[in-house]
């Protein structure tokens, strides 16, 4: 867990640097060269058998598959060994994450009902784990370590929801036969694991086959990474470990790749947007922006507070983590409004090259910055040593 927290903090810094570079280039005389570069085609294959896509497409569906693989591995580890291991332990972060997804979606839908931008309802439901943990790391020992673990567990549950949303609602022209082939490949992985014949090289080969099948099906191929991560073998904590499982070996190998290469490249390719507020003169684009800003800044914190309060106070399933008070939950909810990577990812799937994509990206940037600054301020105000507050979430939001 501590290794993951450190890696996410570093990843957040690289992500910010890459996004800043993309923004500077896009708003300079190099804009056309920047946009043209990502549209160059790159072919992978043998003879007539291969795939030719733009550099940007290879990043979004190829390299991001590795990113989602790491996400899937993190989810699998938390379910088998970590904060999601038991229903009681998982109830608080799961209910907080559900609230943090549902409320932003409802806010976006209410502002875009019947509008051309309604399809972007999934944009404000996600949290950028790397950036949120990176911002939290800046506070050092001002926040308890249990809050960092709680926030990470919330984001793991959030990632599950985001992956499911992308797989179900943001795909089109789905072909059945390649999906059946993908199901067969997945079944082969699970059977080989069951009979203890699955090796890392076999897993990687079958993973490539799974990616190719899903790519051919019309489903966004990045989902293959998440599926593989959840399918990767991992040894439960209660069992004596004599050799690292495939999941652990992959995670240790791939976290540096995603941290230093994939996430910065994704930001470099996708965060380039002309900072022109004139795009909001269009009523539909303005509603898209309002839905994203309202969903990330207001919806995330309200949803996470509400979900946590239901689990702790209303249902009494579990207490708050040790040394965590409601003020910390408020601050964590604000940091969860840093949407960035996955929000931009869903915005690209929702609007592509339409006139709403710039409005969406500018709104994501603005909302993420506000959420980060306000979240840091709220957490900074929390005392280092304290008694747990008994105030309700509504009272806390009024006080802050």
Image: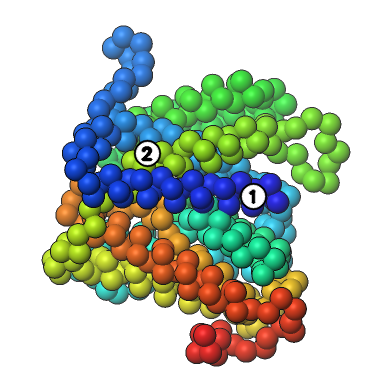
In screen coordinates, is 21 left or right of 332?
left
Residue 198 placement (x, y as % from top left): 66, 25
Residue reaching furthest to the left: 282
What kind of element bears circle 1? helix
- The image shows residue 160, relative to residue 287, as above or below, that is above
Q: Which image quadrant for residue 104?
A: bottom left
Q: Which residue is mark 2?
A: 60
In screen coordinates, is 118 left or right of 334?
left
Residue reaching furthest to the top: 47
Real-space CA distance between mark 2 and mark 1, rounded to the nearest whole angstrom: 25 Å
- The image shows residue 298, relative to residue 285, as above or below, that is below
- State yes or no: discs 2 and 1 in contact (Cβ < 8 Å): no
In screen coordinates, is 16 left or right of 32?
right
* Pointer 1 local density, CA inside 10 Å: few below 14, some 14–19, many at least 20: some
Q: Which mark is residue 364?
A: none
What kind of element bears circle 2? helix
Residue 136 placement (x, y as % from top left): 58, 62
Q: Is residue 83 visible?
A: yes
Q: Is residue 296 visible?
A: no
- The image shows residue 342, relative to residue 232, as above or below, that is below
Residue at the image position 63 percent from the left and 83 percent from the top: 314
Residue at the image position 53 percent from the left and 41 percent from the top: 259
Residue 293 placement (x, y as % from top left): 34, 69
Residue reaching furthest to the right: 240
For the residues carrying marks 2 and 1, which lies nearer the camera in this image?
A: 1
Residue 165 placement (x, y as % from top left): 42, 54
Q: Earlier in the sequence, mark 2 or mark 1?
A: 1
Q: Which mark is residue 6?
A: 1
In screen coordinates, is 285 left or right of 389?
left
């Amino acid at each position: 867990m501590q290794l993951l927290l450190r890696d996410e903090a570093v990843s957040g810094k690289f992500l910010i640097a890459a996004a800043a570079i993309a923004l500077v280039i896009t708003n300079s005389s190099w804009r056309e060269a920047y946009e043209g570069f990502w549209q160059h085609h790159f072919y992978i294959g043998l003879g007539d058998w291969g795939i030719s896509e733009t550099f940007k497409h290879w990043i979004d569906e190829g390299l991001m598959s590795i990113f989602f693989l790491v996400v899937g591995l993190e989810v699998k580890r938390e379910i088998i060994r970590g904060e999601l291991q038991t229903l009681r332990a998982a109830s608080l972060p799961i209910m907080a994450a559900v609230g943090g997804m549902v409320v932003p979606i409802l806010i976006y839908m209410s502002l875009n009902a019947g509008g051309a931008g309604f399809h972007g309802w999934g944009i404000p439901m996600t949290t950028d784990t790397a950036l949120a943990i990176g911002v939290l790391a800046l506070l050092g020992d001002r926040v308890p370590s249990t809050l960092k673990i709680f926030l990470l567990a919330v984001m793991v549950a959030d990632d599950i929801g985001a992956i499911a949303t992308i797989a179900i609602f943001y795909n089109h022209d789905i072909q059945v036969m390649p999906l059946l082939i993908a199901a067969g490949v997945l079944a082969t992985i699970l059977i080989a694991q069951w009979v203890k014949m699955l090796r890392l090289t076999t897993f990687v080969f079958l993973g490539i086959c799974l990616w190719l099948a899903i790519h051919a099906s019309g489903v966004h191929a990045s989902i293959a990474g998440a599926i593989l991560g959840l399918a990767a073998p991992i040894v439960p904590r209660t069992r004596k470990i004599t050799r690292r499982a495939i999941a652990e070996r992959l995670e240790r190998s791939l976290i540096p790749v995603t941290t230093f290469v994939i996430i910065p490249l994704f930001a470099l390719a996708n965060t380039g947007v002309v900072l022109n507020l004139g795009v909001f003169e269009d009523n539909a684009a303005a509603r898209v922006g309002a839905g994203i800003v309202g969903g990330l800044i207001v919806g995330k914190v309200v949803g996470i507070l509400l979900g946590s309060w239901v689990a702790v106070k209303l249902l009494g399933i579990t207490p708050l983590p040790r040394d965590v008070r409601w003020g910390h939950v408020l601050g964590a909810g604000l940091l969860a409004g840093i949407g960035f990577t996955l929000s931009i990812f869903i915005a690209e799937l929702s609007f592509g090259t339409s006139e709403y994509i710039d409005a969406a990206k500018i709104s994501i940037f603005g909302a993420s910055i506000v959420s980060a600054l306000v979240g840091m301020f709220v957490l900074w105000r929390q005392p280092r040593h304290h008694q747990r507050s008994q105030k309700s979430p509504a009272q806390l939001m009024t006080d802050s």
